[in-house]
Image (tube, grey):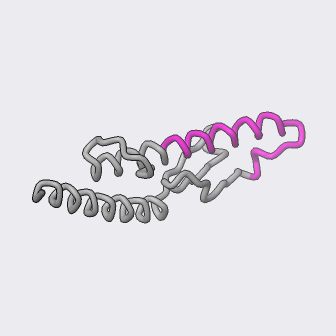
Amino acid sequence: MSSLGKLMKQATRMQRQIETVQQQLAARTVEATSGGGVVKAVARCDGTLAGLKIDPQAVNPADVPLLEDLVLTAVNNALERAKETAAAEMNKVTGGLNLPGAM
């Protein structure tokens, strides 16, 4: 029964570590740009968008469809980087185990 107790202690410790990493990731950000830097997206590593900057020179009423594509690209790239960062940090805690609720 002592090995079961050790396993439970390990699981509890890992859960605390996961919660700590999740909190840290919510505060950590990554950036991505598109259009040569005219659009910049900042994403938190918990999968939310933290900010979006558009160079005023990029705004031309005739170019709205292009601007929309640039924004979409920057946001998707930032969110992908955030997801990769979160996965790498969680992997450090879980040792590669795919735990439900860990992210």
For the point 12% across and 54% down, the residue is 3
In this view, the residue in front, 38 or 47, is 47
Residue 28 lies left or right of residue 36; in this view the side is left
For the point 31% across and 61% down, the residue is 17
Quadrant housing residue 21 = bottom left
Image: 28 above or below 61: below
From the top left corner, tell me how far across and down residue 85 is, in percent: 41, 47
In this view, the residue in front, 19 or 71, is 19
Q: Name the main secondary structure of what is drawn in magenta.
A: helix
Residue 44 lies left or right of residue 74; in this view the side is left
From the top left corner, tell me how far across and down residue 40 is, in percent: 62, 49
Looking at the rendered image, the quarter that the N terminus falls into is bottom left
Image: 27 above or below 87: below
Quadrant housing residue 74 = top right
For the point 19% across and 55% down, the residue is 7
In this view, the residue in front, 75 or 95, is 95
From the top left corner, tell me how far across and down residue 98 is, in percent: 36, 41
Q: How many marks?
A: 0
Residue 38 lies left or right of residue 67; in this view the side is left
For the point 10% across and 59% down, the residue is 2
Q: Which residues are magenta?
A: 56-81
Image: 54 above or below 34: below
Magenta region includes residue 80:
yes
